[in-house]
Image (cartoon, helix red, strand yellow):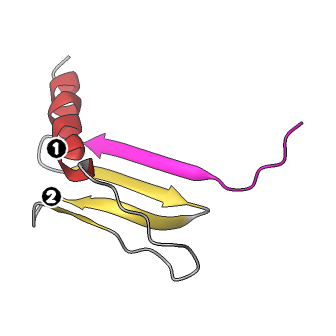
């Protein structure tokens, strides 16, 4: 068995009127899509080196379109 050093998590969700996309590392939110202000937010704890996510907001927007399309099925 392998020892786990870190746990990462990505969540995507949507409804007809709202959406969510976020990444977490070891239980701490490190990136989320702010669809109201049309940008990605990186509220990272000081305990880690800053991580950037180039293109992540655009990917989140595309993911929301797919998610909403799936709701219709």
Residue displayed at 45% across by 47% down: 10
Secondary-structure class at tag 1:
helix
Q: Position of residue 49 (x, y in %)?
A: 52, 72
Kindly indicate whether the residue at mark 1 contacts the one at mark 2 (C-beta within 8 angstroms): yes
| Residue at the extreme right of the image, as rendered | 1
Let me know if residue 6 is in the magenta part: yes
From the viewer's side, name the closer residue of 31 and 15.
Answer: 31
| Residue at the extreme top of the image, as rendered | 73
The residue indicated by pointer 1 is 61
Residue displayed at 43% across by 55% down: 23
The residue indicated by pointer 2 is 35
Classify 10 Å Cα crowding around label 1: few (below 14), some (14-19), many (20 and above): some
**In this rendering, position of residue 53 left or right of residue 38:** right
Classify 10 Å Cα crowding around label 2: few (below 14), some (14-19), many (20 and above): some
Q: Quadrant of residue 13?
A: top left
Which portion, as a residue range, is magenta? 1-15
Name the mark on residue 40: none
Residue displayed at 13% across by 40% down: 16
Q: Position of residue 6 (x, y in %)?
A: 68, 56
Seen in the picture, residue 38 relative to 49 is either above or below; the reply is: above
């Amino acid at each position: 068995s392998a020892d786990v050093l870190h746990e990462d998590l990505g969540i995507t969700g949507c409804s007809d009127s709202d959406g969510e996309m976020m990444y977490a590392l070891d239980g701490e939110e490190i990136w989320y899509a702010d669809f109201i202000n049309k940008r990605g937010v990186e509220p990272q704890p000081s305990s880690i080196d800053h991580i950037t996510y180039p293109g992540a907001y655009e990917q989140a927007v595309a993911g929301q379109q797919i998610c909403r399309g799936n709701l219709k099925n």
